[in-house]
Image: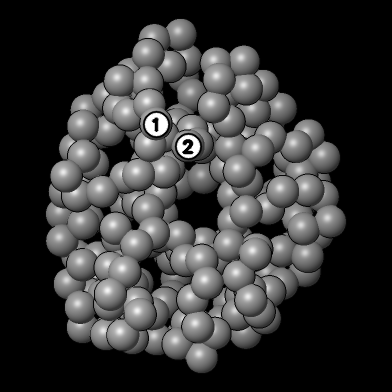
Amino acid sequence: MNIDVPVIGILRGVDPAFFKDVMNTAFASGLQAIEITMNTEDALSMVSSNIPSVPEGKLLGMGTVRNLLEARKAVDAGAMFLVTPNTDNDVLEFANANSLPVIAGALTPTEVYHAWSAGADMVKVFPCRPFGPDYIRELRGPFDQIPLVAVGGIAPDNITDYFDAGTRAVGASTSLFGRKALKDNDLDEIGRNISNFIKLCP
C-alpha cells in the first residue's frame, strides 16, 4: 500500500449526511487516505455511494474489519483498502486474493510478525496510547523491514516522536479532524486541522 501522505484519517460515528462534505474537505486539505469504521452507522452505504467521487490518487477504505464476513461486506461496498484491529488469517487471505491492500492490527512482537508474514501490507500497532513512541522504536529493532502504522493516541503534540521512532504512518481520528469541528459540521475548521496535522509529518 503506497501512502505518500503518512496519515490515515479514521472516521467513526460520522453523520452519513455530512460524510461526503468531510471527505471532500479532507482530500482537498491534503489527506490521502480515509477509513470509515465498520461499526459506524450506514458505513457500507457511505463507502459505496462515495467511492465514485474519490479523486485519483486518494483512498477510501473501511476500518474495524474484524472478520471475514465484514471483509466481504467491505469489498462488496467498494472499499479501496481494509484496516483491522486484530489479525485474522481469513481476512488477510481474502484481501490478498482480491488484490486489496490490508493494514492488519497487532500489538506484541509475535502478533506483529504474524500479521506481516500472513500477508498484511502494513501492520497497525494498536493501541499505542498505553505504550508510546518508545514501543514503536523497540519493535523496529528486530522488525525494521515491516512498515508499522501507529494508531491510538496519536496527536499533534506527539506525532513527531512517533515518526522519529520509525513508524511508517499514523492513524488518527478526532485529533486530526477536530472533535468540536466534527460535532459542529465546521468544514473550514476541519480543513485547517487536517492541514496543520499533515504539516507535522516528515
Residue found at the very far bottom of the displayed protein = 17
Residue 179 vs residue 85, the one in the foreground: 179
Q: Helix, strand, or loop for circle 2?
A: loop
Q: What residue is rendered at 15% in x and 61% in y? A: 196
Residue 70 vs residue 49, the one in the foreground: 70
Residue 52 vs residue 69, the one in the foreground: 69
Question: Mark 2 and mark 1 in contact (Cβ < 8 Å)?
Answer: yes
Q: What residue is rendered at 58% in x and 62% in y? A: 37
Q: Which residue is mark 1?
A: 130
Residue type at numbered disc 2: Pro
Q: Which residue is mark 2?
A: 127
Q: Residue 125: x percent and y percent?
A: 48, 33
Mark carried by residue 61: none
Q: Residue 149: x percent and y percent?
A: 43, 38
76 over 186 or under it: above or below: above
- The C terminus lies in quadrant: top left
Residue 33 in view (yes/no): no
Q: What residue is rendered at 51% in x and 45% in y? A: 1
